[in-house]
Amino acid sequence: MTKDSLQTTDADGGDLTPPGFSNPGMEPHRPRLSDTSPRGAKRAERQVVFIFTISILATIGGIVGYFAFPLDGVKLFNVRMSTLSIGAGLGIGMLGIGIGAIHWAKSLMDDREKSEPRHPMVSDKPTRTEALEMLREGISESKIARRPLLKGALGTAVAIAPLTFLVPLIGNLGGDWDVEKFKRTAWRPVENGNPEHYHEGKYRYITVDPSNRKLKASDITNGNIVHVLPAGLHDDPDFLTEKAKAAVILVRVDPEIITPLPGREDWTYEGIIAYSKICTHVGCPVALYERTTHHLLCPCHQSTFDVTDHAKVVFGPAKRALPQLPIAVDDEGYLYAMDDFDEAVGPSFWERER
């Protein structure tokens, strides 16, 4: 190494090196144990393989945890353990790849310092050729071709590491692609239903949430709201899923101020009107009622719906009115649903005509 190799020049080629500056040169290379001892190099290789193996086992453990602790929505323990196993598997798997690569570089790759004179860099063909040669030299110095065990361990660790999040992602897609079920709720009429829960064995009675008590029209006073569910829904094996779609709010107002949509003139009973409780913005429960304005309010993002005007949006980010449930009463005055909602409930991620 000469002084010229570290000199800085101006545009005219003049030397800009401070007076009295002498080139210190490179520090002598201090060989590592892996440079001087084949046994030391083999030991370092085994250490790197061991770290990559930990990464591989962690990834496999995360996948096993995903299947061992299914998220059935019932057992809180499964939720905790599934989250822990997947998170630990992903974290340790990626960390192992990083630590293994660093240890490989520090213990087995060439660590000699190199320098070259500074000069204008022009992306011409010789420069590109030189860069390609440097890449080839780096690959050669990594000795990956001579260490198949190392190469296999690294390749396996990198290849399977993404499985920790890909398997749960793909697995949670499920095998049921019946999108029509999102447009149906427990309010839909059935044939030969339990007379205790269905009017004429067909139309679902309306019950108070959560007592599951059948509701009479006379129980609802003017200006109040009642949170209701389909009768007998608590016995459904998919109770939480069905409740998320079938939750409804009943409101009683003066029948004279209701402005029904065409074809919905008989969907109410003596001022009692029923709307989905699920906000059409992001699915929060629309649980607040302003008695003086007859507005239903979603507490999450303040979407506001006018009860008297088919629950159309009067404020907030929601883009669609709350779906309305057609209701009627039997001979004893108990309320029931004449049909299911005429459109899907919840956030507006389906294409809509309105």
Image: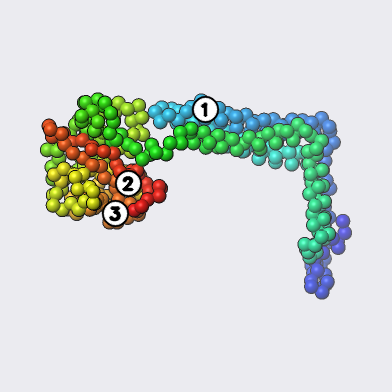
The disc labelled 1 sits on which kind of residue? Phe
Which residue is labeled 1 in the image? 67
Nearer to us of marks 3 and 1 is 3
Name which residue lies at 52% across and 30% down: 66
Where does the image place residue 313, in percent across and percent down from the top left? 29, 54
The kind of secondary structure element at disc 1 is helix
Q: Distance between the residues labelled 2 and 1?
A: 34 Å
Name which residue lies at 36% across and 49% down: 281
Name which residue lies at 23% across and 38% down: 338
Mark nearer the N terminus (2 vs 3): 2
Where does the image place residue 174, in percent across and percent down from the top left? 48, 33
Vertical placement of 61 versus 15: above or below? above
Q: Which mark is residue 196?
A: none
Q: In which quadrant of the rendered view does residue 162 lie? A: top right
Q: Horizontal placement of 271 versus 93: left or right?
A: left
The disc labelled 2 sits on which kind of residue? Cys
**In which quadrant of the rendered image does the N terminus lie?**
bottom right
Is residue 42 in view from this perspective? yes
Front-most of residues 81 and 303: 303
Nearer to us of marks 2 and 1 is 2
The kind of secondary structure element at disc 3 is strand
Where does the image place residue 42, in percent across and percent down from the top left? 79, 31
Mark nearer the N terminus (3 vs 1): 1
Name which residue lies at 18% across and 39% down: 328
The disc labelled 3 sits on which kind of residue? Val
Q: Which mark is residue 313?
A: 3
Which residue is labeled 2 in the image? 279
Where does the image place residue 349, in percent across and percent down from the top left? 40, 48
Farthest bottom residue? 12
Classify mark 3: residues with Cα within 10 Å, few (<14), some (14-19) or many (20+): many
